[in-house]
Image (cartoon, grey):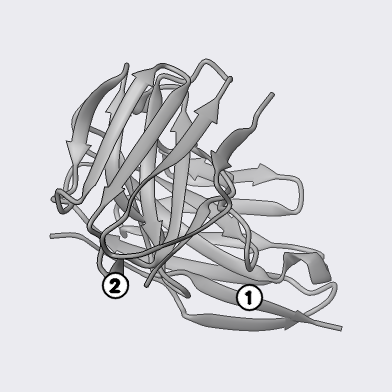
């Protein structure tokens, strides 16, 4: 089987830094993606890690440790518009039958 | 153009109705996906099409029938649905099935089964 675990809720203030952790247990793992979804909106791709280390995209960074089956999304200089749900997702499967499985999501609330 | 469009935005149907959801992308993507999402839950994969062929069916009941008429279009035909099928149905696409990690999602169709 497979499982992904992430905190259900995180609260932070504007301008702060927040880290959303994700641990996974799965076979045939290729990489870890992060998606953002605002209430009533569609999921939006944020980042992807196939190799160990940190990937930086503007205010957002994502980290992966394959040996620890662990990753995190780091959001810096938080803004009110960052209030949303954040999903980690594992990419797994054979070529031609590869798919994403999403974690349960972390609801981030940014307060003034 | 990085947009995936879905129609209709909202759909209310009875348990005996037949309806279809439509999805379109013009990014030249060769993989397309259907997901079901309940409130406060993650998207749940239903079907994957790769190069217009069904490659993954996640044991979805036969009352949901996908169709990929061409590389830009994806349909989901609905028949004899149950109230528990009420959810947000999301379509997504990616460059190919190998690039499944980066998917572009449409806004979804909010389906209510009465």
What distance separates the C-alpha of mark 2 from that of mark 1? 28 Å
**In terms of secondary structure, where does tag 1 sit?**
strand
Q: Quadrant of the C terminus of chain A?
A: bottom right
Spot occupied by residue B26 in the image (x, y as percentages of width and height): 58, 20
Q: Nearer the viewer, residue A79 or B66?
A: B66
Q: Nearer the viewer, mark 2 or mark 1?
A: 2
Q: Residue B67: name its quadrant.
A: top left
Q: Which residue is mark 2?
A: B84
Q: Residue at x 20, y 54 (%)?
A: A26
Write down the chain letter for disc 2: B
Q: Which residue is mark 1?
A: A108
Q: Is residue A78 visible?
A: no
Q: Residue B71: name its quadrant.
A: top left
Spot occupied by residue B53 in the image (x, y as percentages of width and height): 24, 21
Q: Residue at x 49, y 35 (%)?
A: B23
Q: Is residue A77 visible?
A: yes
Q: Residues within 10 Å of mark 1 (few under 14, many from 20)?
A: many
């Amino acid at each position: 089987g497979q499982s992904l675990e992430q905190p259900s809720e995180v609260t932070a203030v504007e301008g702060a830094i927040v880290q959303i952790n994700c641990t996974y247990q799965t076979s045939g793992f290729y990489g870890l993606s992060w998606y953002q979804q605002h209430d009533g909106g569609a999921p939006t791709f944020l980042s992807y890690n196939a190799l160990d280390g940190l990937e930086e995209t503007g205010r957002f960074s994502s980290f992966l440790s394959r040996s620890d089956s662990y990753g995190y999304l780091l959001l810096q200089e938080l803004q009110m518009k960052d209030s949303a749900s954040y999903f980690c997702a594992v990419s797994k499967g054979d070529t031609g039958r590869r798919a994403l499985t999403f974690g349960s999501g972390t609801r981030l609330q940014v307060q003034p | 153009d990085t947009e995936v469009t879905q129609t209709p935005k909202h759909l209310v149907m009875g348990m005996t109705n037949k309806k279809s959801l439509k999805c379109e992308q013009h990014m030249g993507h060769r993989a397309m996906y259907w997901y079901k999402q309940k409130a406060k839950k993650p998207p749940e994969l239903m079907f994957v099409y790769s190069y217009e062929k069904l490659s993954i069916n996640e044991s979805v009941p036969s009352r949901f029938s996908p169709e990929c008429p061409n590389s830009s279009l994806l349909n989901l035909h609905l028949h004899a649905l149950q109230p528990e099928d009420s959810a947000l149905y999301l379509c997504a696409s990616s460059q190919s099935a190998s690039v499944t990690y980066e998917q572009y999602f449409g806004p979804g169709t909010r389906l209510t089964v009465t």
